Image: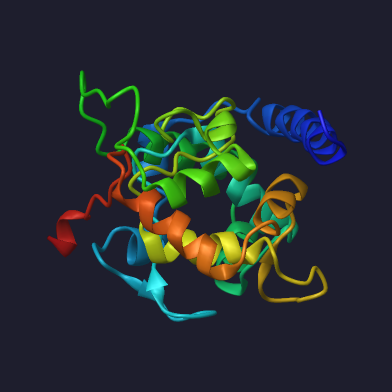
Amino acid sequence: MNKLFTTIFAVAVAFATASGQAQEIKGDAKAGETKNAMCIGCHGIKGYQSSFPEIYKVPMISGQSAAYISSALHAYKKGDRKYPSMRGIAESLTDQDIADLAAYYSASGVVAGATLPADPKAPSPAVQALLNKANCASCHGANFSKPIDPSYPKIAGQHADYLFVALKSYKMDPGNAKVGRGNAIMAGMAKQYTNAELKALAGYLSSVDGELKTVPESRFR
């Protein structure tokens, strides 16, 4: 195992432990449904786009794992993820609020009995080489919907433009006060790629069948 992956593994263990501690508070999906007023204006409208730091569709979060949603919100709250509006929202939430919202969105839109293929559709040889370069499936699962740790995101079927922006954010200068993500694992991975390669990865991952979706609120249907 080379030095990069040894370091990544050690950080992954520490990150997973911290995420597990953050999940000790039990979330209530019913309570989360009453607390999502600040979420639905972006994540409850199909095709809704953000304009910062560039134009892209906001991520689909219904069907995402509760542990990942909780981890992401805590990262915004702490400033490890730098995005002004999301940090402002996260800072207004208690740990219980975060747990409740995570529980709600993890169950939102889930169809009982629905299954995904064990393996995704085959990528092009060029994209397969890119996937192999950072061994993406080793963390996010062979079909990119069953990550090895629930605090890692499901990425299959996620919007390509969002994935591209998210991946680029791990390459940002940590001194940037408004944009960037402070995750040593993903930073090490993302910095191996050019932006053109990240766009190719994002395009493929968005085309894979996944569990993520946008579930509109009744007022937006």
Q: x and y percent of residue 22 in the render?
A: 68, 34
Q: Which residue occupies the extreme left position in the image?
A: 221
In the displayed structure, does residue 210 sit left or right of residue 100? left
Q: x and y percent of residue 117 in the render?
A: 28, 25
Q: State the quadrant of the N terminus.
A: top right
Q: x and y percent of residue 133 in the render?
A: 62, 44
User: Which residue is rendered at x = 75% and y = 35% of the image?
Assistant: 15
Q: Is residue 81 something one can see in this rendering?
A: yes
Q: Please state which of residues 43 and 173 is positioned toward the viewer in this rendering.
A: 173
Vertical arrangement, residue 112 with respect to residue 22, above or below: above
User: Which residue is rendered at x = 60% and y = 57% of the image?
Assistant: 90
Q: Please state which of residues 37 and 21 is positioned toward the viewer in this rendering.
A: 21
Q: Please state which of residues 149 and 100 is positioned toward the viewer in this rendering.
A: 149
Q: Which residue occupies the extreme front position in the image?
A: 125
Vertical arrangement, residue 195 with respect to residue 43, above or below: below
Q: Please state which of residues 24 and 113 is positioned toward the viewer in this rendering.
A: 113
Q: Is residue 60 something one can see in this rendering?
A: no
In the displayed structure, does residue 30 sit left or right of residue 109? right
